[in-house]
Amino acid sequence: MGYGLVADLVVLTSYLRSGELEALLARFSASANVMPGHLRASYQTNEPLTGYSELVKKTLPFALILTLALMLTSCGSATITGGGPVVVLPSETPVEPRPTFAPDAKIGISLAFGAPEDMGTKKPSLFSTSLTEGLTQAGFQPLLSFPRHSVDRQRSQVEEMIDQGVKVIIISALDGTAMNDLMAIAKQAGIIIIALERQLVNTEDVDMYIGWSTCLTGQLQATTLLEGLAAKKGSPPWNIELIAGSEDDNNAAILFRCAMDVLGPKIEDGTLIVRSGQISFKLVATTGWRSDYVRTRFNRIFPKNYPPGTALDGILAPEDTLARTAVDYVRSHSKSKPIVTGNDSSIESIQWIAKGRQYATIYRSDRALAAEVIRIVKQLQLGESIAFNDTTTYDNGVKIVPAFVLTPASVTKQNLCSVFDTKSIYARAAAKTSYCKN
């Protein structure tokens, strides 16, 4: 082996071991007149590069060096880090994973939910408190921010996180597409991106999704609606109406689709009747999850489809505020007392369930979600691979985002007094109801 090749090999090996392969590829591709993105796309998809024969002449020495370097760095298994979850090259003799960032690294957190001002309390949500306290106890430096319904504010907060050198950004985006340019900048800086509870759509620059199973949530809503109808409304057929979340929230579409996996066959066989005829996501979506849109829509469809003597038996609602809005409208315009589902276990809906005005909601333990986020951040820091449990559901329009999802719980009057985390605001709200006091 010539001296020049040995020198190149030593340099490349050091790049591989320091996690700076991307920078080296960029320098190499410039000399080969190939854009870095073009080169990356080719080695990720195995598609042939244009100008192949000419490129081979320029890349063959590099390929030889790269192969030898990988042999040196992969006596066990080689871990290439920086800018995303660990990629482990196959090997017969695995080695211990290497940390991808410092154990006291800054972790950026931008939450679209849980601000004290939004909750009418002096303290942040149990989730945000559990997350920041847990990350701090683990040795990290969490940087928490709440955009409070302002996309511009969230963008500014994320920019500040990038400037402060965070190693991970955990983001629940107000708008799933409004952060794409910032996510690209973050990825270029080697930051790992975790979408929390809400998807980042139409972007490659997201590493994973963590949250409650959106699909199972939709299925639980549909199942509890059918259970409530059977328990409270006699024999079918039953008249129902459908409400979905916002068109710009990818999770809203998943929620509705999975609910319709349960309800669709019942509509087709006549067990359920949607008198308005509105059964597509586009027709039943609620822009911005705004309750006034529900009132406006029901003002259009209810009077002509539910004249006196025609009852609306049930409503599929994706979220508690929209559920209460729909029930208020229907009860103020008719004698109907519909079975209605919800989501999020809001305090007012807990009270409504105790009184029988709302049939069900969905509970997602704040402590459980925070614990899983903390566990995964620890694994990322240590360079360990992540065991995702859903690699098919979360299509963001550009790619399937690997996900770790948790199982939510359906809440009805039957389990209202026992289902919530102890000492949580939900448990306290349930305990204050006359139903749980008795």
Image (tube, grey):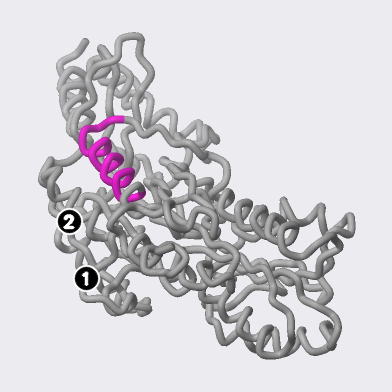
Q: Position of residue 130 (x, y in %)?
A: 24, 54
Counting every numbered tag in the picture gives: 2
Residue at x 56%, y 53% (from the top left corner): 217
Asked whether disc 2 touches disc 1, contact meaning CB atoms under 8 Å apart, the reply is no
Q: Secondary structure at mark 2?
A: strand
Circle 2 packing at 10 Å, graded few (<14), some (14-19), many (20+), is many
Location of mark 2 (residue): 142
Report the magenta residues as a range.
369-384
Location of mark 1 (residue): 123
Q: Nearer the viewer, residue 433 or 88?
A: 433
Query: Compared to 234, does 276 lie above or below?
Result: below
Where the N terminus falls, by quadrant?
A: top left
Main secondary structure of the magenta stretch: helix
Examine the rendering and report whether any part of residue 31 can be seen: no
Query: Compared to 4, does 309 lie above or below?
Result: below
Q: Position of residue 348 (x, y in %)?
A: 45, 74
Indicate the quadrant where residue 83 lies.
top left
Examine the rendering and report whether any part of residue 210 can be seen: yes
**Kind of residue indicated by mark 2:** Pro
Q: Nearer the viewer, residue 199 or 111?
A: 111
Q: Is residue 160 left or right of residue 403?
A: left
Q: Nearer the viewer, residue 230 or 73?
A: 230
Query: Compared to 161, does 275 lie above or below?
Result: below
Indicate the quadrant where residue 260 lies.
bottom right
